[in-house]
Image (cartoon, rainbow, N blue to C red):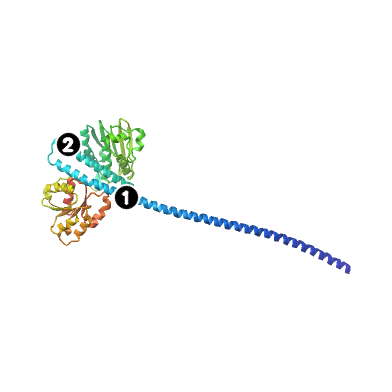
Amino acid sequence: MIDESISSIRRILSRERLARKEAEEIIEQKSIELQELNQELLKANHCLEEKVQSRTLELETTLRELKELNQELSLAKEKAELAIKTKDNFLATMTHEIRTPLNAVIGIAYQLLRDNPTEKQSKHLETLRFSAENLLSLVNDILDYNKMEAEKLEFEKIPFNIKSLCQKVRNTWAIKANEKGVRLKYVMDSEVDSLVLGDPTRLSQVLNNLLGNALKFTEKGKIVLTVEEVFSNQEKLHVCFRVNDTGIGIPSAKLESIFDHFTQADSSTSRKYGGSGLGLAICNKLLLLQQSQLKVSSIEGEGTTFSFVLVFDRAEEYMEEEPPTVIDPQALNEVTILVVEDNQINQQVIRWMLLDWGCKVTFAGDGYQALELVSKETYDIILMDLHMPMMDGLETTKRIRSTDNDNKQVPILAVTAAAMMGEVRNDILEAGMNGVISKPFKPEELFVQIQEALSGKYSS
């Protein structure tokens, strides 16, 4: 029994030793595996650190490049804004310098036409006046195009009669057409003879441009201005305006490019007929801004048709037709006027006009002379140039308004060749001026402005 027990114990001990050995081998194997896994983890962690470091460097580089790019963009923006400002200043300066002598040319032409010239002299003077006004129109076109590019052009919405406006535009070109031997016809739909809300100035600008172009490129035959209703109801009126001519026509390959600025159908066209190639681009932009579009069809050698459709709101109020301006010299007889103007030629032009109306005129060449004169004399009205040496018109006006003499309340009208009128209008009013006259001006425009200022109806 004892031997069997011992044998049993030995077998148990042998199995335990075997089991312990197997367990130790397993533990050793797992320990090796854990060491290998730990090495792999260490290697993976090292790789991860390298990737993080690399990615961090990439991000830092990208952020640095973005910062540099942002600085470049900011610098480019500043340069662009400076370029735009420089361009605007250049346009303002150049147009002011052009408008100032144009005021003298147009004013002198009007004055000489009143002095009973011979028939030959009259024709020359009319040509001179017409050419000067065409140059002024070109200057205004350039300014309008610049405003449209800068999105600063605003449209009026005032009542006007379409038929009356179109008749005036047609009459403007009838004389030139007659001189050239070209018939200028006018076809008006009776339904269009109504009062609408819109911008008559811009509509006139488009029609004048189209009729002027048609007359320029038509040597014989006719030009027809057609105005017809397309659709109407109680609130809206859709009107189609069409200008057809029998002129030189436009090659089909050039039809798509004629609305590009400074472009004409052919370089020889500008040499023979003149023009800047800017008019149609302006017309099309004016129409696009009013949700319309200028369309063209043409056959080379036979003629061209331009057309567009505008939608107007109907005007409810009745508006009497304004009578043409009639200058009554007695209305300004003995009126005392101080003219503050540094340009001697423009002084002479305005002197002729005012003396013809019986005014008593005194001139000042700059702001300091003006202040000295208003301290000694009382005037009925002051015409103030804006751009002068020594002291400009705005500062001079402010000082006059701050005085205690009788001229403190005298009407002061700005007389300026400033290009960007919208930008100076607020300055003019804030300085204490009552209105503004834009150079160059016609005699009747000056007369009306003075009369309205004297009556208390300031045109600003």
Q: How many callouts does the rendering have?
A: 2
What residue sits 57% from the left and 56% below the top?
50
Query: In front: 446, or 371?
Result: 371
Query: In front: 193, or 348?
Result: 348
On the image, the x and y values in percent for residue 454 come to 16, 53
**Amino acid type at image mark 1:** Thr
On the image, the x and y values in percent for residue 408 come to 17, 59
Q: Is residue 432 above or below residue 260?
A: below
Residue 86's mark?
1
Which mark is nearer the camera, 1 or 2?
1
Q: Is residue 57 above or below residue 237?
A: below
For mark 2, what is the residue?
A: 123
**Amino acid type at image mark 2:** Lys
What residue sits 13% from the left and 38% below the top?
117
Q: Residue furthest front?
A: 390
Q: Please indicate whether residue 335 sits to the left or right of residue 437 in the image.
A: left
Q: Residues within 10 Å of mark 2 (few under 14, many from 20)?
A: few
- Quadrant of the frame with the N terminus: bottom right
Q: Please indicate whether residue 29 sits to the left or right of residue 441 in the image.
A: right
Disc nearer the start of the sequence (1/2): 1
Secondary structure under the numbered disc 1 in the rendered image: helix
Q: Is residue 232 visible?
A: no
